[in-house]
Image (cartoon, helix red, strand yellow):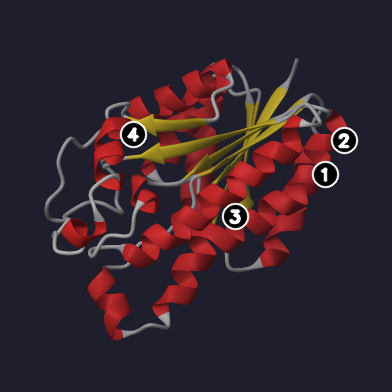
Amino acid sequence: MNSTWIILGATSSMARAFARAVAAEGAGVLLAGRDAEELAALAADCRLRGARMAEAVTFDARDARTFGPIVERAEAEEGTINAAVFVGSMPEQAAIDTDPALIDGVVADSFTGPARFLQVLAPVLEARGQGTVVGVGSVAGDRGRLGNYVYGAAKAGFATYLSGLRNRLTRAGGHVVTVKPGFVDTAMTWGLPGLFLVAPPEAVAADILKAVRKGRNVIYTPFFWRYIMLIIRHIPEPVFKKMKI
């Protein structure tokens, strides 16, 4: 059966790797983002890799007017409609501490914008009785840390939203996969101090596709972050609040 993937934030490193992977399987892709030129180039690349259809569409997490046209375009395709959300922004916590107004953009990009889009898409998936949503969160959402607690809070909210959406769509034959990457080699993490065990985007994309095929609910990628975060979540609060992690 035909499959179409809506990929939000398609010009990010992880999203590019994922788009290329599903294109190689013959899926159609709607590449959503703000940079029309980069999206057009990625669409051409996906077609060369075997995508049944590849188009660039305008998406801005802070502008709900861009949501409806993407869903309508997806509805024009036969078969299964899926969505993968790679959207997010992470200013330095020090910058947010200086200018708290930056919180609004972080929350809109990393949580409320994607959630509003998925609320528009959900009835379409329910009507078709199938479809997968991949929501990319972050290990930062597992516990508030000194270095990025605003971003972590936004991703924690998104993870909780995805859990509820999973409950909703499961009843109609759909599914939701929550993805929690550790450090990935992307523009968002480039140059940040203290990074270790940095994964290539292609490895993350492969893990996501494996999770989709197996119907997994929540994955950490690379897998060892599950155990790292298990330890971090269980550090007693009196100790944790003194740590610089």
Marks 3 and 2, the one that precedes in the sequence: 3
Position of the C terminus by quadrant: bottom left
Label 2 amino acid?
Ala
> Disc 1 versus disc 4: distance between alpha carbons?
31 Å
Q: Disc 1 designates what residue?
A: 123
Position of the N terminus by quadrant: top right
Q: Nearer the viewer, mark 4 or mark 2?
A: 2
Q: Disc 4 designates what residue?
A: 201
Question: As displayed, is residue 143 above or below residue 17?
Answer: below
Q: Nearer the viewer, mark 3 or mark 4?
A: 3
Question: As displayed, is residue 107 above or below residue 53?
Answer: below
Question: Residue at image x 82%, y 40%?
Answer: 124
> Disc 4 versus disc 2: distance between alpha carbons?
33 Å
> Disc 1 versus disc 3: distance between alpha carbons?
15 Å
Question: Residue at image x 84%, y 30%?
Answer: 128
Q: Are marks 4 and 2 in contact (CB under 8 Å)?
A: no
